[in-house]
Image (cartoon, grey):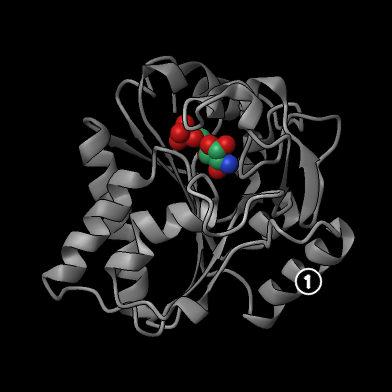
Amino acid sequence: MRVIRCKDYKDASRKTANIISAQVILKPDSVLGLATGSTPIGTYQQLIEWYEKGDIDFSQTRTVNLDEYVGLAPDHDQSYAYFMNKNLFDHINIDKANTHLPDGTNRNAKEQCAAYDELIRELGGVDLQLLGIGHNGHIGFNEPSDEFVKGTHCVDLTENTIDANARFFEHRDEVPRQAYTMGILDILQAERVVMIITGESKAQILHDAFCGPVTPKIPASIMQLHPDFTLVADEAALSLAEGL
Ligand code: GLP
């Protein structure tokens, strides 16, 4: 694994955007695996800025997102589809028909999850997967568990995750209890994986995920085994990770 040390959030966002932009320049029809959460917002803003300057062309780029809440339609302002439009897709020249997320409105979990894995296969797999990390070590919505789940699946969100995501909803009760998420094998099969971790509040989980053993109790730890894994982190997030 490669570690890119950054000064702060802005620096980490620019470096991550640089990696994504290089990917799109080298392979314009890349399949980008994209993530939500507050961390990648700075990366998306930087990509938008470079697009506006004429430096990046997304016209052939395809995307698959990691996850979506079960029960939320794309026009719900807390759905991840809405997040992606607002924070990236509405501001660049990507063809929306080439952007994909699990369909949260499809309550048939088995059907929806199989369809999403099939879609990733049809696209030829993910060239570059962007990841954030939850405070409990989740990636996408792969929550801590006794085993890794391979393919796209429906998860019951942990209380920890519901609490963390409640800040985006008016009431905690409105936070969906389930989500569809790509599985660990889907993520491991991406050609390259870039994870962005910033801020002091993520220092402990960064340490646990990358300075300790690989375990499904900390899903992000599996990325230690990926052959092309880059961790982009700021000084605050790296503060407990001696030796990385
Ligand atoms: C959500 C997403 C994850 C993301 C996590 C961390 O739970 N499903 O993909 O990594 O939030 O979010 P943040 O970057 O806001 O800490």
Rendering coords of residue 80 (x, y %): 53, 51
Q: Is residue 213 left or right of residue 156?
A: left
Q: Is residue 148 above or below residue 94?
A: above
Q: Is mark 1 within 8 Å of ligand 1?
A: no
Rendering coords of residue 78 (x, y %): 51, 44
In percent of the image, x 56 and y 24: which residue is there?
171
Rendering coords of residue 139 (x, y %): 61, 41
Residue that carries the numbered disc 1 in the rendered image:
115
For label 1, the SS is helix
Q: Is residue 242 visible?
A: no
- Residue placed most toward the observer, 47 or 218: 47
In percent of the image, x 56 and y 59: which residue is there?
74
Q: Quadrant of residue 138?
A: top right
Mark 1 surroundings within 10 Å by alpha-carbon count, few (fewer than 14), some (14 through 19), many (20 or more): some
Q: Is residue 4 left or right of residue 120?
A: left
Q: Is residue 80 above or below residue 240?
A: below
Q: Quadrant of residue 173?
A: top right
Rendering coords of residue 5 (x, y %): 30, 35
Q: Is residue 93 left or right of residue 151?
A: left
Q: Is residue 208 left or right of residue 13?
A: right
View extreme (left): residue: 53
Could you tell me how many numbered marks the image carries?
A: 1
Q: Is residue 82 above or below residue 55?
A: above
In percent of the image, x 29 and y 71: which residue is there?
92
The amino acid at mark 1 is Ala
Q: Is residue 50 above or below residue 149?
A: below
Q: Is residue 208 visible?
A: yes
The quarter of the rendered structure image containing the C terminus is top left
